[in-house]
Amino acid sequence: MAYTVGDLVAEFLAAAGVTTAFGIVSIHNIPVLDAIGRRNAIRFVPARGEMGGGHMADAHARATGGLGVLVTSTGPGAANAVPALVEARFAGSPLLHVTGQTATRLLGRDTGAVHDVPGQGEMLAAVCKSVHRVRVAEEAFGVLLAAAADALSAPMGPVTIEIPTDLQRAAVARPAALDRLVLPVRPAPLPAAAELDALAEMLAAARRPMLWLGNGAKGAAAEARALADLGFGIVTSWNGRGTVPDDHPMSFGALHGNDAPLVERFYEGVDAMVVVGSRLRGHETLDGALKLPRNLVQVDVDPRAAGRTYPSAQFVAGDAAAVLGGLARRLGGRLGIEPGFAAELARTRDAARAAYRDTLGPYADFPAQLRAAMPRDALWVRDATVAGATWAHRLVPVHGPRDSIHPVGAAIGPGLPFGIGAALAAGPAGRKTVMMAGDGGFAMNMSELFTATQERAELCCIVMNDGIYAAIGHIQDAFQDGRRFFGELRHPDLQALAALAGIPAWRVDRADAFGETVARALATPGPTLVEVDMRAIGPVPSYGPYAKRRSA
């Protein structure tokens, strides 16, 4: 049997460390998936839609730190994957999208071939870090190397490789380099020693310094913790959660000041804040209105980050671990942290959390109940929902840099497929995954519940069910004088849907029963569903910015 480009793709992915891939088998990817099936070195997860499969691959990459892989058909199948590629680009996820293309003899001729979309590459280039195409069989290995390396090179992101269907079946010599595969990943830039010296000199004079840790700091957990041990306060973006465990005594977690006035007032006394690998995104900074310390330093692998959101007093381009490690070595024994700084931070954190809980109405105890029910190493996955933007992001502690996954682009719908991808990454190590979505977001990909069943994902799905797009309703209250057009939802009975999918399910209609119900679901093997009947418990309070606008 001839060795084909399809065989090469399958063997390459396994040699690159890929253990799980996601997608849908179709006319334009059969040779690749046939090779994956015959070789049986990679678990292939058949999603119910390309968007869901892409979100699964994205979450799997975030949970493992490795390369996520999505395989789709060309044309409509590739187009269906665009929302997932958009989210992966927002989140900086190393996602490799393998798709087909029209046979080479028809490529670019607009002949009406099946699934042929003129401009497919341009469409994907708009949402990907880069797009690569195999034009002859002999270049397939080199194109695979370039595409995978680009996805994994900082700043990471989604990359597409197009392989025409006839080339997938074409015979090719097996590259000997597969026996010792090393991806040519571009190393993150190292900071200049002079820049580190200057930054350390400035920080040595600080008496109340803090770190703001974003997604780009996840690989610098040990170095960030070393600075916390020297006396730095810690706060994280929503996508940087767990880089330093949220229960570290010097950490605010993700209670970063947006709608937490006690934390914002605390920032007024911070004399240096080092922002590491974070965009300081609009929904976490009130679109730049959040007041951060004037002495703001930014550290990022991307030089374009300098001044992109907030002006910075100093900018250092470089790998987060190298920068923070270099600072820790230079600052050892030199810091004169103000006596009482740590105690004040702890008091502010506890008071701010209590004040925030007081805004949650009947859901005030949900964060504590949920955290008590979850194992410490459980993965915490959220969809974009009011509960996610309030207590789920801020008050449920996260303890590891890859334990928190949410839609960075703030789209609703990724929650369930995120949960499946994360669960398939964590499950082999005996870890559980908890996913929370609103009923509106859950409905967008609810067919993936059958993927969770088929794959026996160790996943507890929590659905906050109020029958409306609550976040949109709050915005309509704030800006449209309360006219709530088109936001009411009619969806299937979730208990019946779970039964149809063969998934054990529970309904919670009392606030004090939430944690014990989640604990029961987590003790049940395989996927489970917990429906929170919000119409029985009470409406969710408005997301802070819109509550303020309405009451103004």
Image (tube, grey):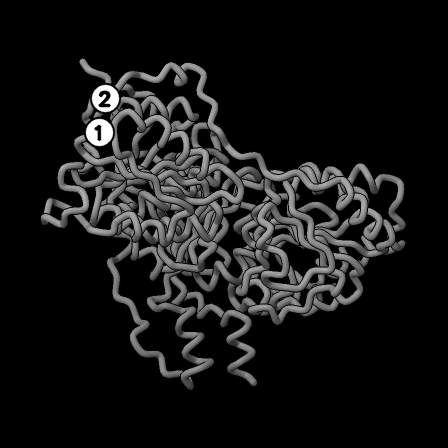
| Residue neighbourhood size for the residue with mark 2, other residues' Cα within 10 Å, grouped as few (<14), some (14–19), many (≥20) | many
In percent of width and height, residue 304 lies at 57, 54
Point out which mark residue 4 bears: 2
* Residue closest to the eye, 119 or 421: 119
Q: Residue tagged by mark 1?
A: 168
C-beta proximity under 8 Å, tags 2 and 1: yes
| Residue neighbourhood size for the residue with mark 1, other residues' Cα within 10 Å, grouped as few (<14), some (14–19), many (≥20) | many
Point out which mark residue 70 bears: none
Position of 29 compared to 338: left or right? left
Residue appearing at x 69%, y 41% in the figure: 191
Residue appearing at x 36%, y 36% in the figure: 69
Q: Is residue 339 above or below residue 399?
A: below
Residue appearing at x 47%, y 80% in the figure: 478
Q: Is residue 370 above or below residue 550?
A: above
Counting residues from the N terminus, which is met first, the one under dot 2 or under dot 1? 2
Position of 551 compared to 474: left or right? right
In percent of width and height, residue 517 lies at 44, 49
Callout 2 secondary element:
loop
Q: Please state which amino acid type lies under the numbered disc 2.
A: Thr
Q: Please state which amino acid type lies under the numbered disc 1.
A: Gln
In percent of width and height, residue 188 lies at 59, 38
Residue 307 in view: yes
Q: Is residue 374 above or below residue 412?
A: above
Residue appearing at x 40%, y 59% in the figure: 411
Q: Is residue 150 above or below residue 112?
A: above
In percent of width and height, residue 190 lies at 66, 38
Q: Quadrant of the C terminus?
A: bottom right
Position of 79 compared to 116: left or right? right
**Residues under labels 2 and 1: Cα distance?**
7 Å
Callout 1 secondary element:
helix
